[in-house]
Image (spheres, grey):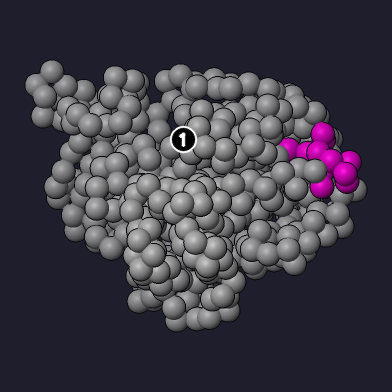
């Protein structure tokens, strides 16, 4: 950004943020409709392992029932491929190169990580400024900005046990008569995959099944343990550490979460708020089970941008089931914030990069994802447009925006309609060289504009408890 522009930006930024906090006239309610919004994030939910996608194993009957009342996007993508950058994008409507919270987990362990800039207004802060009660039920770390704008925080996974779920229902019940925005996040489907439901009786003795299903409870409250590695060691001992059995265990986690979703929906109906509430469900990334890296079939997200890493569910249950439709058009995680605000007739903060999906369809939607590759020290970026997916791997990237176009070490190009499993790289095919060049030019310009906002990040120092949690999930 040029110096003259930087000098003017803070003034106009402040003016626009003030304007963004005021209700404006929209299609629905003109700012007067009761606002009861539940934004639900599944950690590690792979879209094509849900029944609404046609998956054969009975993983998600409750989500399928919910999808019948909703606008369900079958081609939705996050803007990162692991938890932290994807969730910051969800709550800000911005790409990682704009919000800047896109370092690997080790950066926070080394006290070099970034937290969200104070100049960026989160979805919770938008509602908080409008006197809407803001509630959070999630362990996502406060140090990075995840608690910003919330009046009441439950720092635990609400599906972790019955006591926590009861606290979540009480939180909702206490605010059923007023306006509220509730953000829920669960990691119970994330590795370790401790749910044996879909492992046949011939695969497990009663003793082994009991140990798998009770593994999390057995280690609850223990620190300084890599829970994923400990569980995987047991799977090897039990001769269950293979792609098929790991998928069955993972699917059991989805079914476990789905059961709580069903109970949550029934509770909302009993409280009399299901019909008038907006219920948004999304995931931060998918999961890989050896499709492209055969030796890696357990907890391998955060590594690449193939479809299994990225394809996620996105469900909008609008108030009064205002839209019921299965939508094939591409959608992006950064579209969630502007869609929620647009429905209620609320202006967007000026720096949002997502687009509203409310009563809008965009078959030509361009999707961008970017993330530090965990444990590799490199950056990957992806652009999806017109059925073509272009993936770039960069070395020696700038720590702020993760860009170094001079150190591109790999380029890949896939045509998803004809090659949905991404087996044929077209990047060196003479017929598609021009396509790859065009997509790289588009990606460069998108990232350039994204990074030009140049928000000043805060130091993101995680507390000991959060670092221990990352360790139990295998991120450190």
Residue placed under numbered mark 1 in the picture: 48
Q: How far across and down, in percent of the image, does residue 388 sit?
A: 30, 25
Q: In the picture shown, does residue 30 fall above or below 448?
A: above
Q: Nearer the viewer, residue 60 or 307?
A: 60
Q: How far across and down, in percent of the image, does residue 241 sit?
A: 35, 58
Q: Quick one: quadrant of the C terminus?
A: bottom left
Q: In the picture shown, does residue 378 fall above or below 405?
A: below
In the displayed structure image, the side of residue 270 where residue 432 appears, left or right: left
What residue is shown at x 41% (from left), y 72% (from top)?
230
Q: In the picture shown, does residue 218 fall above or below 81?
A: below
What residue is shown at x 39% (from left), y 65% (from top)?
238
What residue is shown at x 89% (from left), y 41% (from top)?
272
Q: Nearer the viewer, residue 33 or 228?
A: 228
* Circle 1 SS class: helix
Q: Is residue 340 visible?
A: no
Q: Nearer the viewer, residue 34 or 352?
A: 34
């Amino acid at each position: 950004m040029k110096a003259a522009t930087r000098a003017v930006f803070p003034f106009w930024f402040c003016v626009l943020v003030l304007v963004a906090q005021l209700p404006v006239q929209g299609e629905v309610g003109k700012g007067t409709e009761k606002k009861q919004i539940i934004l639900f994030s599944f950690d590690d939910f792979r879209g094509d392992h849900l029944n609404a996608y046609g998956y054969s194993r009975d993983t998600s009957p409750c989500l399928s029932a919910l999808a019948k009342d909703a606008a369900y996007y079958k081609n939705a993508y996050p803007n990162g491929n692991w938890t932290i950058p994807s969730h910051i994008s969800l709550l800000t409507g911005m790409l990682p190169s704009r919000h800047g919270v896109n370092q690997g987990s080790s950066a926070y362990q080394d006290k070099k990580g970034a937290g969200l800039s104070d100049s960026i207004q989160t979805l919770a802060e938008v509602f908080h400024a409008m006197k809407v009660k803001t509630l959070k039920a999630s362990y996502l770390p406060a140090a990075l900005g995840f608690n910003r704008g919330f009046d009441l925080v439950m720092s635990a996974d609400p599906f972790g046990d019955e006591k926590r779920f009861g606290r979540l229902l009480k939180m909702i019940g206490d605010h059923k008569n007023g306006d509220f925005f509730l953000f829920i996040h669960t990691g119970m489907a994330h590795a370790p995959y401790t749910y044996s439901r879909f492992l046949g009786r011939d695969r497990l003795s009663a003793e082994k099944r009991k140990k798998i299903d009770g593994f999390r409870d057995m280690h609850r409250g223990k620190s300084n343990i890599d829970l994923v590695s400990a569980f995987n060691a047991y799977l090897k001992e039990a001769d269950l550490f293979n792609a098929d059995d790991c998928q069955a265990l993972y699917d059991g986690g989805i079914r476990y979460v789905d059961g709580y979703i069903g109970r949550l929906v029934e509770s909302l109906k009993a409280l009399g708020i299901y019909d008038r509430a907006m219920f948004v469900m999304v995931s931060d990334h998918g999961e890989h089970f050896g499709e492209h890296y055969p030796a890696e079939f357990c907890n391998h997200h955060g590594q690449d941008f193939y479809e299994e890493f990225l394809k996620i569910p996105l469900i909008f249950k609008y108030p009064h089931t205002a839209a019921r439709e299965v939508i094939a058009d591409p959608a992006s995680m950064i579209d969630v914030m502007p869609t929620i605000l647009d429905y209620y007739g609320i202006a967007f903060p000026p720096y949002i990069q997502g687009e509203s999906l409310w009563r809008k369809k965009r078959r030509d939607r361009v999707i961008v994802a970017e993330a530090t590759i965990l444990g590799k020290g490199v950056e990957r970026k992806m652009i999806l447009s017109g059925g073509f997916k272009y993936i770039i791997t960069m070395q020696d990237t700038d720590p702020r925006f993760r860009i170094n176009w001079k150190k591109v070490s790999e380029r890949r190009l896939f045509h998803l309609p004809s090659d949905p499993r991404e087996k044929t790289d077209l990047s060196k095919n003479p017929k598609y060289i021009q396509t790859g060049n065009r997509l790289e030019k588009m990606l460069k310009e998108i990232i350039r504009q994204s990074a030009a906002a140049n928000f000043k990040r805060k130091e993101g120092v995680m507390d000991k408890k959060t670092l221990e949690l990352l360790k139990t999930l295998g991120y450190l």
